[in-house]
Amino acid sequence: MQTPLESLVLHITQLVQILVFVAGCYFFGISIFGWIKKREKETGFCPPQKRFALVIAAHNEELVIGHVIDSLKNQNYPGSLYDIFVVADNCTDKTALLAKTHGAYVYERFDREKKGKGHALEWIFSKLYDMDDRYDVIGVFDADNVVSSNYLREMNKLSCKGHKVIQGYIDSKNPFDSWITCSYSIAFWLANRIFQLPRFYLGLSCGLCGTGFCVDISVLKQIGWGATCLTEDLEFTMKLSLNGMKVAWAHEAIVYDEKPLTLKQSWNQRKRWMQGHADCAARFLGPLFKKAFREGDLASFDCAVYLFQPIRFIFMGLITIMVWIQTVFPESPFYSLKYVFPAAIPLRTVDNTGGEKVQYESAGRLHYLSLLLSYLGAHNHSGLFKQGQQGMEPYCPYQGNQYKGSGKLHQANYRVTSSCRSAVLSLHFNYFLLL
């Protein structure tokens, strides 16, 4: 007979696991629509017509600022239809000088009170507004990026179709520098395919990634930028959703972003992202759910569910701890999915006397199998990226911060399709077994 306290604990843990399970089913269901990339409909040639202001926010980036400017100047797009602007934000090195040398318009900003990328973008946007409608679209990049030569053509094509905010494909600049960069790269490859792409197909709002995105200047004039927290991209995505606007996805407009090399760098970056995510959740979660249910807005609902992610991860951690406790103390009053799914699989065998005997095969072996499938899928995923046309060639012409300029940026980008599907399937299978 359970005590009232044990009954309360059981029901609370049951609610937690149901929330995590339902959220997992939701994300899994949406991801299915990105497993197979649709063939793009032929809409005819879209001539270059949009005028772009390409903005790079930089703080002490003298080692890499030249690379991103060079890649932007080598676009397959008329040079008369775009300009490059660099915001040298509180720089103490030669970032401004090198940016000028490479042909960008440089604006130096010194403000010790309003620090950070969000404030720097707010500052430069206000200057672009006053340029007599010289530009139609503003593109935003990080200083350590390199941009594919077809980027502006793809953005022009989608912009001409009526999309006001567009996120480009974020790829990895240094996927094989360390196990940290490889992990980041796999995460971004999967996110591009099972998070961004299906949302674009379903008419939901994709997520801005902080770099490689374009915004119609009329949108910025209408609702303002105002995104100055630690995750300004997430903040602006939620602001767009509350104003009834969606982020489109340009799968062929590739931006190569440099990933952290060490665990310490990754920890600091992830901690900053989670702090910003928590800040956005506190401010936007309620209004987004309210808009979703009052107006039947699925895009707002999807954005709200995404903001719920940190809470979901905390719940998953609690579930893991409860499983460990139940392993040591089987009678603990925690709800477990073993009440729904059997923890063991009955196998009927015949003993030496000819009688039937029932043995139980642990379902845990399925879990270990799924982990192996996940590893093999991820390993195959990254391995295909290493394969070039002739033997082993580097996926991207970079080693750390050193630019090699080989011009083979696109060579292996889409060789991942089949292995990506296997990795996605095995990771999802493992996820559901963990639940």
Image (cartoon, rainbow, N blue to C red):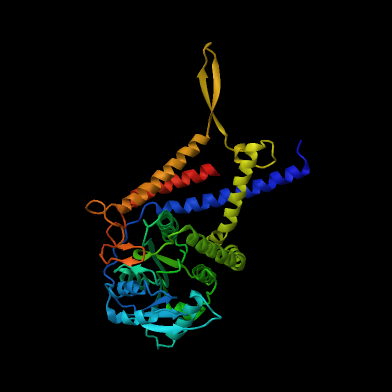
For the point 78% across and 40% down, the residue is 3
Residue under the image location 44 percent in, 56 percent down: 180
Asked where in the image residue 74 lies, by quadrant, the reply is bottom left
In the rendered image, residue 77, in percent from the top left (x then y), is placed at 28, 75
The C terminus sits in image quarter: top right
Q: Position of residue 179 (x, y in %)?
A: 42, 53
Judge whether 7 appears above or below 363 on screen: below
Q: Nearer the viewer, residue 278 or 242?
A: 278
Could you tell me residue 134's position as x and y percent?
A: 37, 85
- Residue 137 appears left or right of 407: right
Occupied quadrant, residue 174: bottom left
Is 292 above or below relative to 104?
Answer: above
Instruction: Note whether residue 146 is visible.
Output: yes
Locate residue 197, reporting x and y percent. Answer: 41, 59
Looking at the image, which residue is at 33% across and 72% down?
A: 67
Q: Is residue 146 above or below residue 199?
A: below
User: Is 309 displayed left or right of 106 in the figure?
Assistant: right
Q: Residue furthest front?
A: 93
Image quadrant for the N terminus? top right
- Vertical relation: 105 (above or below) 356: below
Residue 244 can be seen, yes or no: no
Which residue is more in the foreground, 125 or 174? 174
Residue reaching furthest to the top: 353
Q: How many marks?
A: 0
